[in-house]
Amino acid sequence: AQTVTQSQPEMSVQEAETVTLSCTYDTSESNYYLFWYKQPPSRQMILVIRQEAYKQQNATENRFSVNFQKAAKSFSLKISDSQLGDTAMYFCAFARKAAGNKLTFGGGTRVLVKP
Amino acid sequence: DVKVTQSSRYLVKRTGEKVFLECVQDMDHENMFWYRQDPGLGLRLIYFSYDVKMKEKGDIPEGYSVSREKKERFSLILESASTNQTSMYLCASSLRTGFTGANVLTFGAGSRLTVL
């Protein structure tokens, strides 16, 4: 079974600064997807960024970027130029390509952006 | 433009009651999921369905059942609610496996269930 670990329960960052969230996973699969989801205080979970394991290039979406280290099974999320609207729970998730759309989630990291 | 709707945001039930949590999506998605969210544990998959009347157990199916009679609707049923089922329940949907973007889930706002 796959496991996803987020070692930082909470983090705080000043507005306009950068914060990095860590995520490690355990799998014997070679084809898989990794995700970061954001859950703002209103609770609707939304996708932040997605990475396909066979792609060497790290995914980027505006101020959000990942550092994907396949050998180390590490998938960290960097939020640059943090904004107050980035305050949320962030979940790292894993999906085996062969398992369709079943995602395994980490425990989450609460991010607080301070003005 | 709400895409995944969960019928109840907050519910309070008593131990032993039968509880129905309803989820409806308007995106014509084939796959639907029920997750349970608890602090520190993240989201854990209870059940999922990849077609009408089809279902598969997730990681924590005990004490739950599901129903999918129509493509757009996926119900989670607690046959006899217990206090350890107090939690946040999230419904999600996605395209059929194999399609581009199929593994991107669209979530509902969640249903907070308290069992007394």
Image (cartoon, coloured by chain):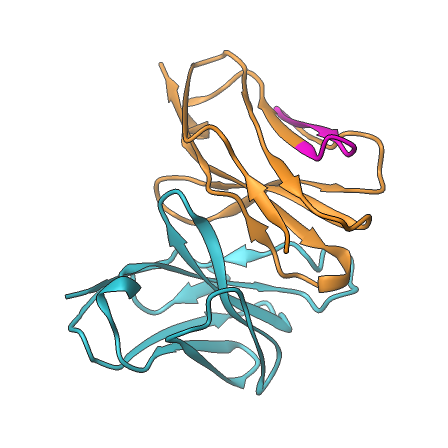
> Does residue A86 sit above or below A44 in this rendering?
above
Q: Colour of chain A?
A: orange
> Where residue B48 sits: x, y (%)?
55, 71
- In depth, the one of A63 and B65 nearer the eye is B65
Q: Residue at x 59, y 33 (%)?
A: A23
Residue at the spot x=35%, y=14% of the render?
A115
Quadrant assignment, res A10: top left
User: In the rendered image of this protein, does residue B8 appear above or below residue A85?
Assistant: below
Inspect this view and state whether residue B10 appears. Answer: no
Of B104 and A98, the residue lying toward us: A98
Residue B55 colored magenta?
no
Image height of A94 relative to A58, above or below: below
Q: In x, y percent, where is residue B1?
A: 48, 57
Note whether B92 is above or below A43 in the view shown: below
Q: Please give left or right for residue B14 compared with residue B35 in the image.
A: left
Q: Is residue A66 magenta?
A: yes
Drawing shade for chain B: cyan
**Region of the chain picked out in magenta, as a range:** A62-74
Q: Position of residue A3 (x, y in %)?
A: 59, 47
* Residue at position x 68%, y 57% in the image: B103
For the C terminus of chain B, the quadrant is: bottom left
